[in-house]
Amino acid sequence: MEVFEAISGLRATRIYEDRPVPRELLDRILTAATRACSSGNTQPWEFVVVTDRARKNGLKAVLAGAFAIVDEQRAQSPNQLVDGTGRAVTGHAAVEHVDVVGAIVFVFWNPDRGVRMQGEYARNADGTLRPVRHVPGGRGSSLFPACQNMMLAAHALGVSSLFTTFFGLVERDVKEMLHVPPRMFLEAAVFLGYGNEPLGKPRRRPLAEVAHLDDWATPYVPDPARVSSR
């Protein structure tokens, strides 16, 4: 798949078939994640790939309770919580399919490789770390490009995906269930599987609404002829 085709066709999929992702495809998708750029080439990511049904059932149980609280705190209007086809874009459907999606890749930041500045983190009594000094970019600047690589590779291989941070609501439970060392930071998770929902054209703001040329007051207006020719 050509790269611009993959970028334009990538969609967040929340409803999945009960179907595993072949290991050879997982190998290629995870390898793509490790090819991402990272701060100082530290490659601070750690991936825990969950395919076992019993573990997914446990994760679904702890997440469902925590996620129910989120709806009371949403800042978006009801209209903003649906896409152009009227399909809900909240995480409810994804939570309901935690147990059937082929794989969930939990993405952790490893401070043993990721810390770059003296005094950036302090150690708590239980061995965990807490940030004490702001460093531009933060942990996501290395991990999120790896997640995007993962999802683009999956799309090119016919595998649907979803990027999410909602497992952060139950980070302690996730670490305990997956036996992850306490000092690791859970930053995101990526669902990988085979979608079971109709996905229409994505609703995106035009470039002129979000990009500026040389000055905030000057919108960046692309040439339609050049854009359409690619």
Image: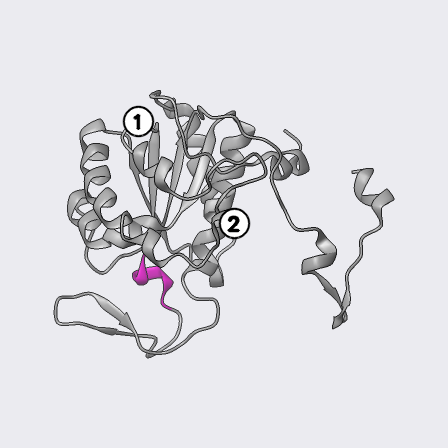
- Amino acid type for the residue under numbered disc 1: Val
Residue at 43%, 26% (x, y): give it: 25
220 sits left or right of 158 in the view: right
Residue at 47%, 60% (x, y): give it: 141
168 sits left or right of 218 in the view: left
Q: Which mark is residue 80?
A: 2
Span highlighted in magenta in the image: 110-115
Q: Nearer the viewer, residue 100 or 51?
A: 100
Pinpoint residue 159: horizontal percent, then vertical percent.
Answer: 47, 27
Above or below, 33 against 122 in this view is: above
Above or below, 125 against 1 in this view is: below
Pinpoint residue 65: horizontal percent, then vertical percent.
Answer: 21, 46
Q: Which mark is residue 100?
A: 1
- Amino acid type for the residue under numbered disc 2: Gln
User: Is tag 2's residue or tag 1's residue first in the polypeptide sequence?
Assistant: 2
Residue at 37%, 62% (x, y): give it: 114
Query: Quick one: SS at disc 2?
Result: helix
Residue farthest toward the front in the current orientation of the protein: 78
Magenta stretch secondary structure, dominant: helix
37 sits left or right of 44 in the view: right
Quick one: quadrant of the C terminus? top right
Residue farthest toward the left in the current orientation of the protein: 125
For residue 199, say whether it is visible: yes
Query: Quick one: SS at disc 1?
Result: loop
Q: Nearer the viewer, mark 2 or mark 1?
A: 2
**Mark 2 and mark 1: span between their CA atoms?**
27 Å
Q: Which mark is residue 197?
A: none
Number of marks in picture: 2
Classed neighbour count for the residue bearing mark 2: other residues with Cα under 10 Å, few (<14), some (14–19), many (≥20): few
Residue 16 in which image quadrant: top left
